[in-house]
Image: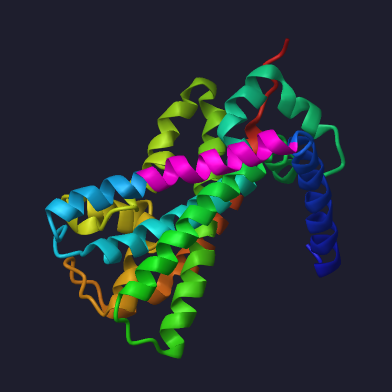
Amino acid sequence: MSFGVALHELDTYRRLAGAYARSEMQYRVSFALRMVGTFAVTIIDFAGIAVVLARVPHLQGWSLYEVGILCGMSAISFSLAEMIAGALDFFDEFVQAGTFDRLMIRPLPLLMQAMTERFSLRRLGRAAQGAVVLAISLRALDIAWTWDKALVLAIALCSGIAIFFTIFVLSAVFCFWTVQGKVATHVFTYGGDFMTSYPLDIYRDWLRRFVTFVVPLAFVNYYPALYLLDRADTLGMPSWTGLLAPVVAAFLGFVAWIAWTAGVRRYQSTGS
């Protein structure tokens, strides 16, 4: 794909997503209330963690504000990835209803069309909550900031979005083989968001290895956070593991592209 073609497709995606966003904002009061509601509901999640840590000052050695870094990074990464690719969570319906057939007759990339079918700006409310929690936590902690730590944080947020994005794509690909099994993939999308909101130290070793080497959710925030906080990994991974988030995201992106291509080739219409 040439650079010009890529720019054209990005512009097309912007236009399609913008159309859905404008339709969502037709009723501005309703849209504002939904944004506020999303913000409020998700801030309650962190408030629950804060209540627990008020009783138990440390969670496997992690303080409230250290856990806040994990929660903030996870919320920002997941909500933005969900805003971009959240429509893929309904991909089983696209296949069952024949919507994907309609997408296939258009001269536009299939994945891009599928992502814009239910584009929703309200998910920015959760991203805002994550940004607030992250900012407060970073301010409260005595982190010895250096240029590499600032860069790691910025790259980790971008990589976290990419990792969750590829998981949404892979969960959609699952529907090409098992149309009715979409709910099973929620353990990696919404379940992954929940899991990464806590330090992986609280989970059993087999689960931590699974989210490090199989479905690498640990690179969304855990390993970058260890690097920022100068903490050692209890699994014995070296400190530079926190720098691998973009490599992991790129690898997952390649896997998702291969899987999506194979799924489209295998696809057969469900009929009427």
For residue 270: magenta?
no
In the image, 254 versus 212, the foreground residue is: 212
Res 199 visible: yes
Image quarter for residue 176? top right
In the image, 256 versus 146, the foreground residue is: 146
What residue appears at the point 38 percent right and 51 percent down from the top-left corner? Answer: 215
For residue 38: magenta?
yes
In the image, 128 versus 147, the foreground residue is: 128
Image quarter for residue 23? top right
For this orientation, the residue located farthest to the top is 272
Say above or below: 92 vs 227. above
Residue 262 position, x and y percent, is 61, 41
The overriding secondary structure of the stretch rendered in magenta is: helix
Residue 141 position, x and y percent, is 30, 75
Q: How many marks?
A: 0
What residue appears at the point 59 percent right and 43 percent down from the top-left corner? Answer: 35
For this orientation, the residue located farthest to the front is 29
Say above or below: 47 vs 243. above
What residue appears at the point 58 percent right and 45 percent down from the top-left corner? Answer: 123
Is 7 displayed left or right of 98 in the figure? right
Res 166 visible: no
What residue appears at the point 18 percent right and 66 percent down from the top-left corner? Answer: 235
Region in magenta: 28-44
In the image, 135 versus 180, the foreground residue is: 135
Is 239 displayed left or right of 75 in the figure? left
Image quarter for residue 266? top right
Is 166 displayed left or right of 47 in the figure? right
Say above or below: 139 vs 15. below
- The quadrant in which the N terminus is found is bottom right
Q: What is the basis of the colouring in this image?
A: rainbow
Residue 222 position, x and y percent, is 32, 63
Residue 185 position, x and y percent, is 44, 35
